């Protein structure tokens, strides 16, 4: 029966009952009749209220089912065209759609969780209080553990790793060496801070790059040996040849008992002088090599980048003026501070700025830009840009190799030294160059 008809019928019966009750009261039809109609009126009123509330109960039951994620409820449908029937059809359709969405969401969750667990990169997520949410299989294998409840437990495995995980901010990375039953592991630790539904948590990735480091180390050694061999042979070959010539000539004179003429003594003196110069060059080369291997640990202090840039301007003023090079400085914000070793960073800036001066020697528009700013990841960036001829791609891949240089009188250790200093500061140095347009060296400091 249609809800409206049922409701109107009950209201009509209640009205009729009230009318009859009033009639018998006016006509004094007796206590029994009055009592009977009063009871009948209350019964009709209760039935009316229950009938009116029946639809609201169904709505409440429907909402409770949604609240409790219970989508199995099915409301009966008689297909009699009533409003109640239409309401049941809508309820069933909504519950079916929610159930379908729930199944799809669970399927996606299981899919991503399976992918998460089978990644070769170790992944850990934990909340602000340190409670671990997810620890995948790769992370368990790298840390040699079966479970991890709190991030503090990593301190018992490796304190340096725990410190890195706790203190790294979004975009920050660090290289940590840990002991493992399978051998020493070099872990590249990377962190991202996220907020999901007002809950802060951190995602940390652990990647074992031991094999890649060993491969790169072997490649670096091969490049270094190649350069060392080339430089040493270039110095020793003429020394050996010249020494052999002088020794042979003197032996011949001694064997024949001949005297040495003044011109011949001058030749010997010139030869010995040449040997001395080449020997000094070789000693300087070895000294430069030693400087790369003995970079002191940085002594950190607050540096005003404005003062650092002004110092570069003063130190290189004569070179800039003699070659008519314009130096422009841009710092955002103006009072930007850097926490680093002042003397070491100053050395890096001198190397890069001098390289920029050499790069603009033969170009009409001689400009060098020194910039400092904070990027989107909160890292402090210092850029040294020139408008020079640029660096060829083949040379670009080798410029940080010790003793490699594109300059006629360069030692080839300036950029290698700068890269080592940046690594000591837990930072990095990058280069981007375009032929006939210029080069940009970028110093990246992890805040």
Image: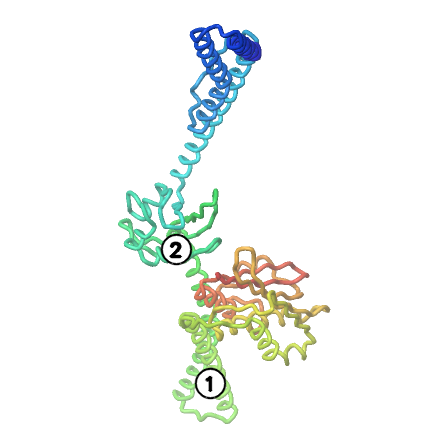
Q: Which of these two is toward me, 290 or 73?
A: 73
Residue at image position (62%, 62%) is 439
Q: Is residue 1 visible?
A: no
| Mark 1 or mark 2, whichever is nearer to me | 2
Whichever of labels 1 and 2 marks the residue nearer the N terminus, that label is: 2
Q: Which of these two is toward me, 371 or 86?
A: 86
| Colour convention | rainbow
Q: Is residue 324 visible?
A: yes
Cα separation between marks 1 and 2:
63 Å
Per the rendering, the mark at residue 166 is 2
Residue receiving disc 1: 272
**Against 428, is 14 above or below?**
above
Residue 112 in the image: x percent, y percent?
44, 35
**Against 144, is 241 above or below?**
below
Please tell me whether mark 1 sits on a helix, a strand or a loop: helix
Q: Is residue 43 left or right of residue 431?
A: left
Q: Which of these two is toward me, 123 or 103?
A: 103
Residue at image position (32%, 58%) is 159
Residue at image position (41%, 61%) is 221
Q: Which of these two is toward me, 127 or 33?
A: 33
The crowd level at tag 1 (other Cα within 10 Å; few <14, some 14-19, many 20+) is some
The crowd level at tag 2 (other Cα within 10 Å; few <14, some 14-19, many 20+) is some
Residue 385 in the image: x percent, y percent?
62, 65
Which residue extends farthest left? Answer: 181
**Against 194, is 164 above or below?**
below
């Amino acid at each position: 029966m249609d809800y409206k008809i049922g409701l109107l019928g009950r209201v009509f019966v209640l009205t009729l009952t009230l009318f009859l009750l009033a009639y018998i009261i006016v006509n004094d039809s007796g206590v029994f009749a009055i009592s009977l109609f009063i009871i009948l009126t209350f019964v009709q009123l209760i039935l009316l209220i229950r009938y009116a509330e029946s639809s609201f109960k169904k709505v409440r039951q429907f909402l409770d089912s949604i609240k409790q994620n219970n989508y199995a409820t099915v409301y009966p449908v008689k297909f009699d065209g009533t409003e109640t029937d239409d309401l049941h059809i809508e309820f069933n359709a909504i519950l079916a759609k929610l159930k379908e969405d729930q199944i799809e969401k669970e399927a996606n969750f299981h899919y991503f969780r399976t992918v998460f667990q089978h990644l070769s990169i170790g992944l850990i997520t934990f909340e602000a209080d340190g409670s671990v949410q997810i620890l995948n299989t790769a992370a368990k294998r790298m840390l040699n553990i079966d479970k991890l409840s709190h991030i503090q437990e990593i301190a018992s495995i490796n304190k340096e790793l725990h410190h890195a995980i706790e203190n790294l901010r979004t975009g920050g990375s660090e290289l940590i060496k840990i002991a493992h039953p399978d051998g020493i592991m070099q872990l590249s630790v990377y962190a991202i801070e996220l907020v999901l539904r007002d809950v802060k948590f951190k995602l940390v990735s652990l990647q074992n790059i031991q094999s890649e480091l060993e491969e790169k180390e072997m490649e670096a050694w091969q490049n270094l040996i190649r350069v060392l061999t080339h430089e040493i042979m270039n110095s020793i070959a003429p020394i050996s040849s010249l020494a052999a010539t002088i020794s042979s000539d003197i032996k011949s004179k001694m064997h024949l008992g001949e005297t040495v003429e003044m011109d011949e003594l001058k030749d010997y003196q010139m030869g010995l002088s040449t040997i001395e110069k080449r020997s000094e060059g070789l000693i300087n080369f070895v000294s430069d090599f030693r400087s790369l291997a003995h970079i002191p640990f940085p002594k950190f202090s607050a540096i005003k980048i404005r003062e650092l840039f002004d110092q570069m301007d003063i130190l290189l003023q004569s070179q800039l003026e003699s070659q008519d090079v314009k130096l422009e400085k841009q710092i955002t914000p103006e009072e930007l501070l850097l926490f680093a070793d002042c003397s070491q960073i100053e050395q890096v800036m001198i190397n890069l700025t001098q390289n920029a001066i050499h790069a603009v020697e033969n170009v009409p528009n001689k400009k060098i830009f020194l910039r400092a700013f904070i990027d989107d990841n909160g890292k402090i960036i210092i850029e040294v840009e020139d408008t020079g001829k640029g660096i060829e791609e083949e040379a670009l891949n080798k410029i940080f190799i010790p003793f490699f240089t594109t300059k006629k009188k360069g030692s080839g250790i300036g950029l290698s030294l700068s890269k080592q200093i940046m690594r000591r500061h837990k930072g990095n140095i990058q280069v981007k160059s375009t032929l006939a347009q210029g080069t940009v060296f970028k110093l990246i400091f992890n805040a």
